[in-house]
Amino acid sequence: MALPGPSVSSTALVTGASSGIGAVIARELAARGHSVTLVARREERLRSLASEIESEHGVTATALACDLAAQESRNGLESEIRGLGRSVEVLVNNAGFGSRGQFVSNDPGRMRDMVRLNVEAVVDMTSRFLPSMAGRGRGAVVNVASLAAFQPLPGSAIYAASKSFVLSFSEAIHTELRGSGVTVTAVCPGPVKTEFVQAAGMAGVEHDTPDLIWMSAEEVGRQAVTGTEQGKRVVVPGTLNRAQSLLGQHTPRALGLPIFGRIWESATSRGSLEP
Ligand SMILES: NC(=O)c1ccc[n+]([C@@H]2O[C@H](COP(=O)([O-])OP(=O)(O)OC[C@H]3O[C@@H](n4cnc5c(N)ncnc54)[C@H](OP(=O)(O)O)[C@@H]3O)[C@@H](O)[C@H]2O)c1
């Protein structure tokens, strides 16, 4: 199994565990006996999930509030984790957010924050914990990217670029680590009914688009952990999404860009613009 077995001296660190896919991944790992360290900004949510996990699965669950977009907060987080006296053997870089709209109309501060969280924090957290996994010859990194990673997306330019970075980075280090006992898995979900939709300024879009394009956070989280157990390089949950990922990769850009842009604009413009 590529996912290391649980031990009393290790923990699985899950970012963005206060809701959606991250909360499901944390539950899935705890169900397999892993102690979990839950990270996000909303501490109350993390505490409540931690106590649910401890009572249901009998593992240690620790809630650590942190704004992962800020380097100094990540420094503090690393010290807190060291204080737990457990090594991080599973790292799930899941925290992230999206947006829609033309780049020229987007709030530049929000775009910078997106790059800091979706890109910089993923690299930084991986740099902090992967070398010791490689040293022990034991560990797994799960990076949550997106279906948006497979092609540029006019109407969500920074989000798609940030997820392309996560996918490219993950596939490259997966290959570098082959045979080391450590795996890196990129998870690329399509649309999932979570708070992501509101945070991206697309509230209501789930009611105006066909049900068949949506997956639940439970299904995506389950497939993320199963794919990690199998040592997969990339997990794209859902048959329709797998087909779309192939189209994204293989359609010539000159043809695909206007089509993907129009489909995205038409799907997302039905939601509210308010985050
Ligand atoms: N839902 C989708 O359709 C979809 C599709 C493809 C990929 N994804 C990706 O899946 C991942 C999880 O998203 P989700 O759908 O589960 O959305 P979600 O329910 O909104 O979860 C996002 C998580 O990220 C955390 N987060 C946001 N900003 C943060 C910050 N500055 N510092 C620390 N934590 C932060 C949030 O917690 P706090 O607010 O408490 O900090 C929350 O726990 C994201 O990377 C997203 O890009 C989602």
Image: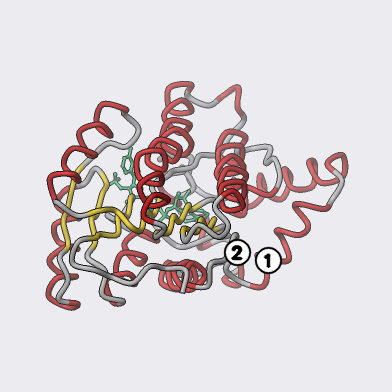
Percent from the top left, x then y, of residue 16?
A: 33, 50
Q: Is 151 on the left-hand or right-hand side of 53?
A: right
Tell me if the residue at label 2 has its CB under 8 Å from ligand 1.
Answer: no
Residue in view at x 53 percent, y 67 percent = 231
Amino acid carrying mark 1 in the image: Arg
Q: Which mark is residue 101?
A: none
Total numbered circles: 2
Q: Closer to the camera, 211 or 170? A: 170
> Is 247 placed above or below 105 here?
below
Circle 2/circle 1 CB separation < 8 Å: yes
Q: Is 91 on the left-hand or right-hand side of 102?
A: left
How is this picture coloured? secondary structure
Residue in view at x 60 percent, y 27 percent = 103
Tag 2, which secondary structure?
A: loop
Q: Quadrant of the C terminus?
A: top left
Tell me if the residue at label 1 has its CB under 8 Å from ligand 1.
Answer: no
Label 2 neighbourhood size at 10 Å, few (<14), some (14-19), many (20+)? many
Label 1 neighbourhood size at 10 Å, few (<14), some (14-19), many (20+)? some
Q: Which mark is residue 242?
A: 1
Amino acid carrying mark 2 in the image: Val
Q: Earlier in the sequence, mark 2 or mark 1?
A: 2
Q: Is 111 on the left-hand or right-hand side of 174?
A: left
Q: Closer to the camera, 208 or 211? A: 211
Percent from the top left, x then y, of residue 99?
A: 50, 39
Residue in view at x 50 percent, y 59 percent = 183
Spatial distance from mark 2 to mark 1, Cα to Cα?
A: 6 Å
Q: Which mark is residue 236?
A: 2
Which of the 4 image quadrants contains residue 212?
bottom right
